[in-house]
Amino acid sequence: MNRPVSPDALVHYVADEKLADLKPPASVLPPWPVALFRTYFGTPGTAAITIVCLAVLAWTLPPFLTWAFINATWTGTAAQCREAGGACWAFIGEKFWFSVFGLYPFEQRWRPATVLVIFAVMVAFSTQRVFWRRELVYAWLAVLALMWGLMGGSVLGIPIPGLEPVATRLWGGWLVTIFLSVFGLAMAYPIGIMLALGRRSRRPVVRALSVAWIEFIRGVPLISLLFIATFIVPLFMPQGVEIDRLIRAQIAFIAFAAAYMAEVFRGGLQAIPKGQFEGAQSLGLNYAQTMRFIVMPQALKITIPAQVNTFIGLFKDTTLVLIIGIFDFFTTLRSALGDSNWLGFATEAYLYAAFVYFIACYTMSRYSQRLEKDLNPERVR
Amino acid sequence: MSTIETPPAARTAFWNDPVKRGLALQAALLAFVVLVVWAAWSNMSANMVARGLTFGWDYLSRPANFAVGEGLIPFAPTDSYGRALVVGLLNTLRIAVVGIVLATLLGVAIGVMRLSSNPLLARLVAGYVEVVRNTPLLLQLFLWYAIINTLPGPRQALPLGPGMYLSNRGMKVPWVEWSHVLWPVVWAFVAGIVAAVIAARALKRRREATGDAPPTLPIAVALVVVPPFLALAVQGFPATISVPVLQGFNFTGGIELSPEFVALLLGLVLYTAAFIAEIVRGGIVAVSKGQWEAARALGLPSPRIMRLVILPQALRVIIPPLTSQYLNLTKNSSLAVAIGYPDLVHVSNTTMNQTGRAVEVILVFALVYLTISLLTSGFMNWYNGRVAIRER
């Protein structure tokens, strides 16, 4: 616009070039050595804490590192290990594949190996939220059946042609741990949802039965359920009918997991505001529709972190099958301790097992923390 | 008032009537459960007959013929299975009570340390919590047991503190020895507690009526502590503290804790403390900073801010999960069977192997755990109800 401008109005208040950056106020940020000193030695109390911590580290770390790395034997025989005096990682190397596959027939090991690969691929897919759709559930069901079939050579009693049957007492190692926890979770999930809904049902019989199940199972140690599965359940079966030992332990584990999952889901259900139920009712949805389309999707979503935490607990609890003599990863490893050529390396074996469990559980818990952030973006600051 | 004619209700099929449908559903469910239980029961009876087993509780009074490693009450192999199970139960309660006390102390300390402004301490403690929480307890128990077994013998025992020694034979700690049971002291203690409760109530009433605040806590503590000491003094101090001393190849004096007990206690305490630490940290973080500032603005001194403002709010967050940790510790103590500490499950397992009474034995110990769990959670719910927000 070409409006006539008086010379007085040529004063303008908009800067037409970038101003120089302001320097940070000198007094606020001390130079980093000073900041570091203040953090660790700023007050007498802090200084004392730092010194005690350093002392503890100096006292424990060097002997451990010397034992675990400097004097350690990585490959070789038990005699060489004893001579070196440090940790005998050669023992772990020797027993590694045994801890993965257990007593599974050597020439058939390609089957559990395939199962492990399929399982790893499925887990990798399932962690990505893009794949969280109905098809993933079907895929998992198919994969679980495939895993079971490959391992045992039959699905639901129907033998698979070309695969030699392998009895479950020969299964062992990582495979059994994975089977116990994954099948446990897969079956406990729907049962847990039913129990949680049952516990909030208006029908007294349904409610009483659900509460009885949940409270009984949560009130007794897992060991008693495993004992019941091992010693009492065979008595409950009609004569001549025998259920496989691993499957019995699996059933006990599912019953256990279902009760704990039910409490997680119940927490989610309680967190859904009443308005959601009322809104669904005013739309004319019946109970099943309300639950399926309105309540459950929200309740399941908000409890995902809790579900993962419960699963971590269940995963750790699979080690208890040691007491009834089922060869999961930890039991297999412990049985390797009995090898007369390699006596006295229990600490190494336990550290290796701890390392494996730690990696698995820590990954899961970090994943659940990330999910918690992703799923509740509004709560993140 | 005019009456409104209600139209005759349309006849609906009974499966569309919510009340009848509900009843039918429940009846069907109940019938199913009864059927399953009945089938299991009749199969069990048939199986037991076929295997020559009988159902009954007579085994409880038969001699056990096995030794129990340790116990709070004396036990000989000629005593009954029933007594063996009681010894096991007392061992379970012993590990649970000691474990809960130690795990709470350690857990609170660690939880506070995680909030330390010194990053070195906070990180170290966080590392400990992560490692312990993410590995199975059973594994940790075996590890501690293996480590205790590789320790030197009593002659080179590790000194842990004044009068405390750890060796491959277990742990030696000082202990109070008394010549006879000190009932007057016990009664003085009980009377002290009663007096303290009455005094605290009276002082509270007075504070609310007049506004001046007498020192309630010191008075209550004095009322609990002083009477037992007076009773002891009257009796001429018949109790002495016995400190373990190395003599020859072993220690004399003090009491010995078995390697199994020490390994189990260590494992349970370190494991549960990590969980309690997270709960405590969460509880303290949950109380907003504004609460501190507001309390300070009211002029309350720091200890009272903690006691009257922060703790009541933090406890509300802390107590429910803390309860389940206590129950977890008690239930986890059943892992004792794996390392050979004679707790209830371990004794039950031996009894079961010797008598073949699987059903009765498992029933007994499952019911005992269930009772402990329900009692504890009932008590904690009551307490939780007391500290919960009273909505008006």
Image: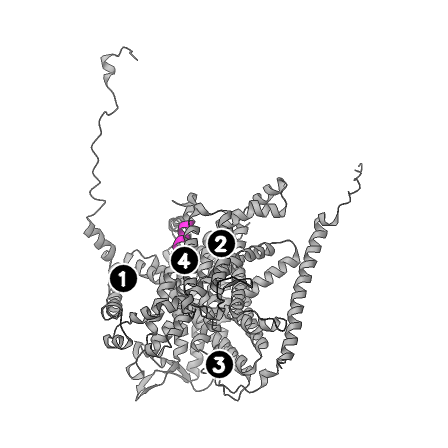
Tell me residue B221's x, y (percent): 43, 69
Q: Chain of mark 2?
A: A
Which comes sooner in the sequence, label 4 or label 2? 4
Element type at mark 3? helix
10 Å neighbourhood of mark 3: few (<14), some, or many (≥20)? some
Using the rendered view, name the quadrant where residue B117 is placed. bottom left
Tell me residue B295's x, y (percent): 40, 51
Above-or-below relation of A334 to B112: below
Residue A245 vs residue A230, the one in the foreground: A245
Q: Amino acid at mark 2?
A: Trp
Side (left or right) of B90 relative to B159? right
Side (left or right) of A356 relative to B48? left
Residue A318 vs residue A136, the one in the foreground: A136
Identify the residue position indicated by label 2 in the image.
A140
Tell me the CA gap for discs 4 and 1: 48 Å
Q: Chain of mark 3?
A: B
Region rendered in magenta: A366-371
Q: Which mark is residue A49?
A: 1
Q: Which mark is residue A88?
A: none
3 vs 1, front mark = 1
Q: Amino acid at mark 1?
A: Ile
Which comes sooner in the sequence, label 1 or label 2? 1
Identify the residue position indicated by label 3 in the image.
B184
- What secondary structure do most residues of the magenta stretch adopt? helix
Identify the residue position indicated by label 4 in the image.
A117
